[in-house]
Amino acid sequence: MARSLPRWTALTLIALAAHTGAQAQEKVLNIYSARHYQTDEALYDNFTKQTGIKINRLDGKEDELLERIKNEGARSPADILITVDAARLEIADQAGIFQPIQSKVLEQRIPANLRTPNWIAFSTRARLVVYNKRDVKAEWVQTYGDLAHPRLKGQICVRSGSHPYNLSLGAAVISHEGPAQAEAWARGLVQNFARAPKGGDTDQLRAVAAGECGVAISNSYYLARLMRSTKPEDRQVVESLGVVWPNQASWGTHINISGAGIIKTAPNRDAAVKFLEYLASDQAQSYFANGNNEWPAVPSVKLDNPALKAMGTFKPDTLNVGELAKNAAQAQRIFDRAGWR
Ligand code: FE
């Protein structure tokens, strides 16, 4: 996930200052975040305005933040971990760092399939299939399963099989079609690779546009970002791509999330619950989702995003994100055996 990122060292100092200054009367909330966009600044400021609770934010990479929380143990100042992808939240949950979230507001606002007992989704993104309109027919790529068909030999571009976005997709295939079918699919997909996996999703989109491959798999917000770009080279990429919502006739397009959990040792638990409830409010939902061209998790929230509007509507997979994430480890073993590096 591209971030306009983090002054790790400076923010580390801010977090430490907050910890040692705990005797101050000021109400605070300490957020460890692996998600950072310029638009999120307004989101945090508004929470402080509404509640008087000051936010100390530590930005970093998912793995670093998780390691840090584990190392800090009971002394951790962390109240909340925000990150992306169900597979990553599952890893954090397996590490035992979260506590159950108890909130009627969240139960009412966030759909049941986007919640687990210990973490909760605030925005969603779809894993799309894109193809080069010059070389590939739309009817060849209507499902994830189609991408393993021999007629697409040498055509597929996709990022590493160990990346959480692909592990979560693999987990969805396991959930709906079983591990044997998932393995056959992964093997077929690898047979069709145009090149060894490299780069992020945007690199795959550009490679399809450049004709290096015929088909790619990408999260929706990377496409939306290009759609909203004013650069002529990005416009050209978008114009050459066909876009498919996969599996509309079966289990729906694979959906992933941005989400958060409350840390087991959170020193400011009430403020943490308040913040998560705030994230589910109408205004915060549109900020949070729009910041990365995602869809709000709360279904009633109106979209204010031309790229998402242009993408239209689709049938999403309604599998619970927690159930899905439990299969990510098995997906990794299957991808390893299939040679999806
Ligand atoms: Fe990303």
Image: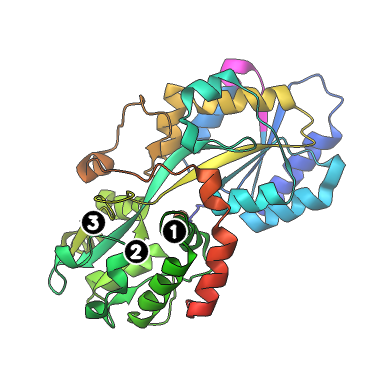
Q: Residue at x 58, y 28 (%)?
A: 276
Question: Which residue corresponds to mark 3?
Answer: 244
User: Answer yes or no: do the residues labelled 1 and 2 have beta carbons within 8 Å?
Assistant: yes
Tell me the residue at 22%/57% (across/down). 243
Determine which residue is flagged by label 1. 169
The amino acid at mark 2 is Ile
Residue ID for mark 2 = 217
User: Of residues 246 and 74, which is closer to you in this image?
Assistant: 246
Q: CA distance from mark 1 to mark 3?
A: 15 Å
Q: Position of residue 224 (x, y in %)?
A: 30, 50
**Crowding near pointer 1: few (<14 within 10 Å), some, many (20+)?**
many
Residue nearer the viewer, 31 or 23? 31
Residue 149 in the image: above or below residue 76: below
Residue sitting at x 34%, y 44% = 316
Residue 69 in the image: x percent, y percent? 76, 48
Amino acid at dot 3: Val
Q: Residue at x 47, y 23 (%)?
A: 109
Q: Which residues are magenta?
A: 48-55
- Is any atom of residue 85 visible in this view? no
The answer to if 230 sits in the magenta stretch is no
Q: Is residue 308 left or right of residue 301?
A: left
